[in-house]
Image (spheres, rainbow, N blue to C red):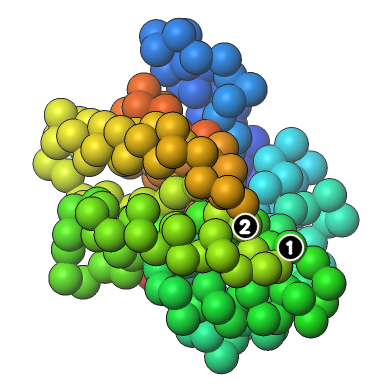
Amino acid sequence: MKENRLERIEYNIERIKEEIADACARSGRSIDEVKIMAVTKTVPCEEVNFAISKGITLLGENRAQEMLSKYEMYLPEAEIHFIGALQSNKVKYVIDKVKMIQSVDSVKLAAEISKRAQICGIEMGALVEINVGAEESKSGIELAKAEEMICEIAEMKGIKVRGLMTIPPICENSAESRKFFENMRRLFVDIKGKKIDNVSMDVLSMGMSGDYVEAIEHGTNIVRLGRAIFGERKYV
Ligand SMILES: *Cc1c(COP(=O)(O)O)cnc(C)c1O
């Protein structure tokens, strides 16, 4: 049973790599521009480590508590990004364990990251999370407010905006997801073009198990995959 699960993960990773290569070829992109992130929520460490051993070294963590209980068991080549809703009072627990925080959605959170990073003597990479579908239920800021917030964060020490992240609405078809990804790509290119001091727009993080192919066609640099690698989660 266990062997089967690991075989399945290996098969999934191979298939995903092929899909990514095809999508890159179709859209004239280099496969080096697209990184696969393994999203680890609810997944046992053993399976995460198996994915790492197959070359998927970038991990996405959603919950501070779950990350703290697992990160010490991960293989040392793992690079962890925080991708879930993060309360300011939890920043101190994750700051020295992650390479990037992809879910920065308020100036208050950015200020706390700035403070904690300076205490640790590091500079934390940050992605600003955009609520591209303007959904009530989702975290992230509106498209129209992104630039203003990025300019505010750019003034802070110990934190550097590296790009944008989004979770688009659940779409009926790929034409619908493409529209959201295209809006993200435009915003990304637009802000990059402004060359804001202390901001390096080099990471666009979008695309999950159901829509990563479309995201690649619209310029993503990190596809965040949970179910596509590990199978369905027991709970969400
Ligand atoms: C769970 C999650 C993912 C992965 O979702 P899948 O549909 O399992 O690929 C990606 N990004 C974020 C922020 C998530 O919470």
The reply to whether residue 84 is in sight is yes
Residue at x-position 83% and y-position 72%: 121
User: For the residue labelled by badge 1, is the local secondary structure a helix, a strand or a loop?
Assistant: loop
Q: CA distance from mark 2 to mark 1?
A: 7 Å
The reply to whether the residue tagged 1 has its Cβ within 8 angstroms of ligand 1 is no
Residue situated in front as seen by the camera: 51 or 211:
211
Q: Position of residue 189 (x, y in %)?
A: 39, 32
Mark with earlier residue (2, 1):
1
Residue at x-position 87% and y-position 56%: 76
Label 1 belongs to which residue?
123
Q: Are marks 2 and 1 in contact (CB under 8 Å)?
A: yes
Q: Position of residue 45 (x, y in %)?
A: 70, 64
Measured along the vertical axis of the image, is residue 116 above or below residue 83?
Answer: below
Q: Amino acid at mark 1?
A: Glu
Quadrant in which the C terminus is drawn: bottom left
Q: Quadrant of residue 4?
A: top right
Q: Amino acid at mark 2?
A: Lys
Position of 127 with respect to 144 (left or right) is: right
